Each structure stands twice: as structure tokens, then as C-alpha cells.
Image (cartoon, rainbow, N blue to C red):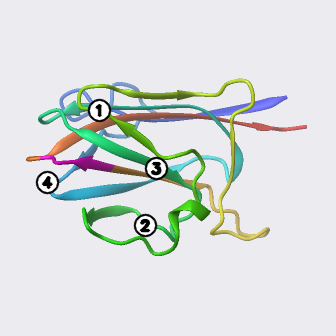
């Protein structure tokens, strides 16, 4: 039997519309944001949705990592360098979304496997790290995100 978990970041007038949702992700001008997303420590990503909901529409680069080594959670200058080679920690291939177009990655058949690299067998870390890098943003941007995961409980 599979166990499913969904993380949602959204907001209408600054407040999430459902109790389990977190506020939308807000990225200051000239910054990129790495959001620490609480999920299982291992499992499969079956769906990712990223949509700009505030600010002037801009293109963005999206990455999902299984470690905080690449970028710690928080805002980083656009030119900030990663802490280690990002290719070693990617859960999905890098995605580039054009301005005004939402990203939707679906793999419900198998999912994209992940295992958090920061924890140990005795100290599970239940996080993935979503990096949103707006390209050419002239102001603050706001983003809604949804990640659906599953893990096998057998």
C-alpha cells in the first residue's frame, strides 16, 4: 500500500485557503529562493506544479534537490554559487518555464525517486529543496507550488 503526501504553498491575499497549505513563496528582486519542503525522507515525486501568481510575469529556472548542500533554505543573490555540484543532488531534471506559463511535471506511473542526503539511518531528514530562480525579475515575485509524493509502505 502506498502512502501519499502533498505539500502546497499558495495564498489568496496573503493567507492559505486550506489549513494544511503554507503561504505562497515570495522572492525579492535580484534574488533566487531555495524553499525547504517537508516531505518523506524518501519516496517518489509524482507531480510538481509551480506557477507565478504575483509580480510582472517572468521566466524562471526550477530545480529540486535532495540536499541542503547545494543551497540552504532562504533567499540567495541571483549570482550566488552552489555549495556543491547541483547535478549530484537533482531529483528531477532542471526545468525552465517561460513567463506566464506554469510548470507541471507529472510522473504518476513510477514517480521520480528521492532520498534525502542530509540525514542518517537514525536521523531521517524529511526535506527536499526547491530552487526558484526568476530570470530578469524587475520586482518582487510570488509563486504557488504543489508537490505530491508517495512511498511504499509494504
User: Label 3 belongs to which residue?
Assistant: 63
Instruction: Judge by depth and name the residue closer to the eye, 71 or 85.
Output: 85
Query: How far across and down, in percent of the image, does residue 40 sit?
Result: 66, 48
Mark closer to the observer (1, 4): 1
C-alpha gap between disc 1 and disc 4: 18 Å
Residue 143 coordinates in the image, percent (x, y):
29, 37
Specify which label sits upstream in the sequence, 3 or 2: 3
Q: Is residue 134 magenta?
A: yes
Name the residue located 65 percent from the left edge and 59 percent from the top edge. Answer: 116
**Which mark is in front, 4 or 3?**
3
* Secondary-structure class at tag 2: loop
Percent x, y of residue 150:
70, 35
The residue at the far bottom in this view is 83
Q: Residue at 35% of width from left, 26% of height from top?
A: 102
SS at badge 1: loop
User: How far across and down, in percent of the image, does residue 153 sit?
Assistant: 84, 38
In-image side of 50 versus 120 (left or right): left
Give the mark, 2 or 1, whose residue is nearer the N terminus.
2
**Vertical placement of 38 versus 86: above or below?**
above
The answer to which of 19 and 54 lies nearer the viewer is 54
Q: Please report the residue visible at 62 percent of the width from the left and 69 percent of the height from the top.
A: 118
The residue that mark 1 highlights is: 98
The mark tally for this picture is 4
Q: Nearer the viewer, mark 3 or mark 2?
A: 3
Q: CA distance from mark 2 to mark 1?
A: 23 Å
The residue beneath circle 4 is: 29
Check residue 71 in the rendering and tell me which mark sits there, or answer none: 2
Amino acid at each position: 500500500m502506498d502512502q501519499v503526501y502533498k505539500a502546497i504553498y499558495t495564498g489568496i491575499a496573503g493567507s492559505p485557503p486550506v489549513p494544511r497549505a503554507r503561504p505562497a513563496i515570495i522572492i525579492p528582486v535580484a534574488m533566487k529562493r531555495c524553499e525547504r519542503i517537508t516531505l518523506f525522507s524518501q519516496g517518489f515525486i509524482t507531480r510538481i506544479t509551480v506557477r507565478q501568481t504575483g509580480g510582472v510575469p517572468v521566466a524562471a529556472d526550477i530545480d529540486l534537490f535532495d540536499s541542503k548542500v547545494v543551497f540552504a533554505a532562504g533567499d540567495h543573490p541571483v549570482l550566488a554559487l552552489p555549495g556543491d555540484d547541483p547535478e549530484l543532488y537533482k531529483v528531477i531534471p532542471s526545468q525552465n518555464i517561460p513567463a506566464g506559463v506554469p510548470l507541471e511535471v507529472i510522473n504518476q506511473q513510477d514517480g521520480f525517486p528521492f532520498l534525502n542526503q542530509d540525514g542518517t539511518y537514525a536521523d531521517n531528514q524529511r526535506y527536499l529543496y526547491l530552487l526558484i530562480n526568476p530570470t530578469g525579475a524587475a520586482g518582487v515575485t510570488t509563486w504557488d507550488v504543489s508537490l505530491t509524493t508517495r512511498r511504499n509502505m509494504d
